[in-house]
Amino acid sequence: MAASSRTNRSRYFATVPTQEILPIVNSRFESSVRGIFVIGDVMGLPLVKIAANQGTEVIAAMQQAGRFGSQADTDAQLDLVIIGGGPAGISAAMEAQKLGLRYVVLERNRIASTVRSFPPGKMVYAEPNFVENKSLLEFDGDLGKDEFLQRVDALVAQNKLHIKENTEVAHVRKLSEGRFEVDTKAGESFPARQVLVAIGRQGQPRLLECPGADDANRVTYRLHSPGDYRGKNILVVGGGNSAIEAALLLMENNRVTLSYRGEDLFRAKESNRRQIEQAEHEGRLKIIYKSQVKSVSTVDVELDADGKRLTIPSDQVIVQIGTLPPVDFLMDMGVELDGIWTARRVMLALAGLVIGYLVYFHAKHFVLLPEAAGDGKLLVPGLQFLGATLFPRFLYWLFQSILPIAWLGGLAAALVNSNMQARGRNPVVRFNHSQRWLYLGLVLYALSWILPEIATLDPAQAGPGPYYLPGLSWVFAVVPHYFKNAYGFYYLLYFSAIAGFGLYWAAKSGKSPIWRRNLTIIASQWTLWWGIPTFLAVFLGRNPWTPLLTRSLNAWPLNMGAFKVDLVVGPGDPAWWHTVAVAGVVWAAVLTFIVIPLITLKWGKNERPMPALPINYFSNFQNSSSETK
């Protein structure tokens, strides 16, 4: 499912359903914009305990990173602006209060507004049960809505938290490093060093997409009070806790049908699932699985139930299918979102494709040791006429002589500006996009050394190669000469990076499931997908089994030549070598189009939760929506 939309900043294209779009943050909850942190429901984990814990953890991460150091204009600038007064924002505010920080919480409604909108009798669950509550919120067991709100209100009053209710944020602007301006729709402005986004999704429900769904008299997305309905035919749409609890509350005085697109209610809390299945068994309500609403009329609703059309009478449709992330608000701040293709991402992806194409199809023509090089240089096509002009020498002089001086001046200006901004002062010299220009300068300077060694505009200097790529010959003091080809060296770096980052993130997480997962990936990459084919080719030498073993493990398109019969039969070789090559092509087709798809279907993404393993538990909630609260 793809979607496109327009924000105040740009147009974007989403490659996932809107409800699955999430902000990209690092282990400290910091977004792609340095100084803007994101926690809570907006991260796709609609769990009160998780949100409260994140509020505690993010303040600790900021303090550990030294984000609350001394500043010259502390009287005019807050240490932190917290956007959102839910469990995540309140927890963060209590930690900020404990540290003596200058902060404010901006909440567009009342604090804990999501819980306040719950219907009477709805529980606030302290899930997951195996996760310890690390926050200052007293929330170690399931609580009723009223008791939870009483505790929150008492904590806010006792700690005298700095909270401004009914204050909706309009824009967050980054002025410079460590300087933000948070503007409200009422015209107020709050300067701050850091911004913490702790908003939920409750204000943007997912909508039904069918004829009649826009009839506000027939379709509603929130159950305020079950007492508003009596003697009605009511269709509840959804399969999470919110939908189940709404159906249970309404069935006492109404005729209730629950429509859910899934085969069973696996996403719901166990107690809720037992209650509604018992109610269905007793005939107190009806559940229609694998069903979707196709149209809403003035007297009934049409469903598609596992390919069959059903029409059921309905006075009211209550939709509880989750909520949507505030994509426009996040993009307006410049926060990068997972699942959205912006112009920058498209350009980076195209650059990656070009680099990948060059590496895959042309790296074999380059070597990293001078003694492995062939004759001549690579002739640049179509530009031979420039060889007789002064233009190539002018570019060489420009990049070798002028560029280093300009680059050092730019680096000095960037360092001075950074120092001035850290002290709360205006930059001495305006140098916009300094990092990009400095990186570009380094690339151009490196190319001015490398290109003349590889390429030529003079046909007389051209040759068949392979061509020497300078600058990396020192590596082979420790790396075997087998990898002297740039293609083989690329794969050595690629799989080494997989191993290095896999071990780093496993050690950083400290969780045994992540250790097991990452070690499994590293072992399979270094053996099946690269190690065995590579080293067998080294040890076995020329024989019919080498190409067969290589393609038997590397499917297309990882192996672009998987369906090509190798010319392995030479003078003096037995004819059956050709049979082995043909068998390799047949197996490559079976592996690519049968084996791997079957493995993916069986052991790919598992949407059902596995409570015994935290990693699966969290991934399940991340894929679900706010209806699981």
Image: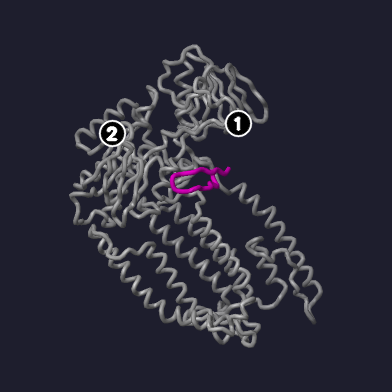
How far across and down, in percent of the image, does residue 310 sit? 64, 23
In what element is the residue under mark 1? loop
**Residue 3 lies in the magenta stretch:** yes
Q: CA distance from mark 1 to mark 2?
A: 42 Å
Q: Which residue is mark 1?
A: 290
In what element is the residue under mark 2? loop
Dot 2 alpha-carbon crowd within 10 angstroms: few under 14, some 14 to 19, many 20 or more: some
User: Relative to the observer, which residue lies in front, 139 or 416?
Assistant: 416
Residue at the farthest top position: 231
How far across and down, in percent of the image, does residue 488 sit? 57, 73
Residue 379 relative to residue 245: left or right:
right
Q: Residue at x 61, y 47 (%)?
A: 602
The span picked out in magenta is 1-16
How far across and down, in percent of the image, does residue 518 sit? 48, 57
Colouring: one colour
Q: Which residue is mark 2?
A: 165
Residue at the farthest right position: 575
**Residue 149 lies in the magenta stretch:** no
Among the 4 quarters of the image, the one containing residue 112? top left
Q: Is residue 101 visible?
A: yes
User: Relative to the observer, which residue lies in front, 270 or 377?
Assistant: 377
Identify the amino acid type marked 1: Lys
How far across and down, in percent of the image, does residue 615 sit? 45, 47
- Ranked by sequence position, the earlier of labels 1 and 2 is 2
Identify the amino acid type marked 2: Glu
Q: Residue at x 44, y 81 (%)?
A: 400
> Which label lies toward us, 1 or 2?
2
User: Relative to the observer, which residue lies in front, 99 or 139?
Assistant: 99
Dot 1 alpha-carbon crowd within 10 angstroms: few under 14, some 14 to 19, many 20 or more: some
Q: Is residue 446 above or below residue 132?
A: below
Q: Is residue 210 above or below residue 574?
A: above
